[in-house]
Image (tube, helix red, strand yellow):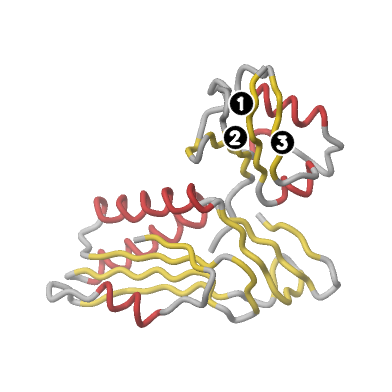
Amino acid sequence: MKTITVELFGRLKDQLGFVQRRYQTESATVADLWQEIVSQSAVNGKLEQHSIRPAVNDEFARWDQPVSEGDRIAFLPPSAGG
Amino acid sequence: MFELSEQAIDIAGLRHRLQDPRAGGFVSFEGWVRDHNQGKTVIALAYEAYPALARREGAKIIDEAKQRFDILHAVCVHRVGQLAIGDMAVWVGVSAAHRDAAFAACRYILDEVKSRVPIWKNESWSDGQSGWVE
């Protein structure tokens, strides 16, 4: 079991109902963790993985990146600045 | 240089950073908060960023512009926090020896910042509702 921190931004905070949360997880990859979070949440609205980008420890990451103890893993909706 | 700012953007200070004896001019772009979007009347908005990642990605875009175009200096500042209609949301400035490179680099930086820098916009509408706009 690994202890990690999950952070959400933009609409994902409203859709999944939290901003930051510590997680105990056995998920091997970032994609597995995302599925775990979604399956445990009462998802509000449409949540398509292809529109979301993960970041691990302040770096953009791949969905197949392994989850390690102490990671700070963020999920980002499409950017909308400007 | 790329920065996030919680305060109103200081154009005079930024313009000063672009000055260079080798420059023949500079091009700037100001993005303003407009009062309508996607058929709705906007009364205010808030920008949220992922600061560490936004700063890193913004700096990368500035570096790319310097490699792709024959420019001297490039600066972009993006607001975060609460903004009112007419407020400046983003400022891009580029100085160069010649104007073509300055125009092209300014456009490049703005387009890339909009699509790549992790910043999100929450609009408040005249009907009392608000929501994230992508």
Residue B134, position in %: x, y?
A: 65, 54
Which of the pair B115/A17 is nearer the observer? A17
The tag earlier along the polypeptide, 3 or 1, is: 1
Asked if the residues shown at circle 3 and circle 1 are in contact, with their CB atoms under 8 angstroms apart, the answer is: no
The image shows residue A20, relative to residue B109, as above or below, that is above
- Which element is circle 1 on? helix
The mark lying in front, picked from 2 and 3, is 2
Look at 58% across and 23% down and name the residue there.
A69
Which residue bears the numbered disc 3? A48
The mark lying in front, picked from 3 and 1, is 1
The tag earlier along the polypeptide, 2 or 3, is: 3
Distance, label 2 to label 3, CA atoms, is 18 Å
The tag earlier along the polypeptide, 2 or 1, is: 1
Look at 64% across and 61% down and name the residue there.
B121
> Residue lying farthest left?
B22
Which residue bears the numbered disc 2? A73
Which of the pair B93/B10 is nearer the observer? B10
Residue A28, position in %: x, y?
A: 62, 17
Which residue bears the numbered disc 1? A30
Does label 3 lie on the same chain as label 2? yes
Q: Determine which quarter of the picture holds residue B39.
A: bottom right
Q: Which mark is residue B101?
A: none
Residue type beneath disc 2: Ile
Residue type beneath disc 3: Glu
Residue A49, position in %: x, y?
A: 68, 33
- The N terminus of chain B lies in quadrant: bottom left
- Chain for numbered disc 2: A
Residue type beneath disc 1: Val
Asked if the residues shown at circle 2 and circle 1 are in contact, with their CB atoms under 8 angstroms apart, the answer is: yes
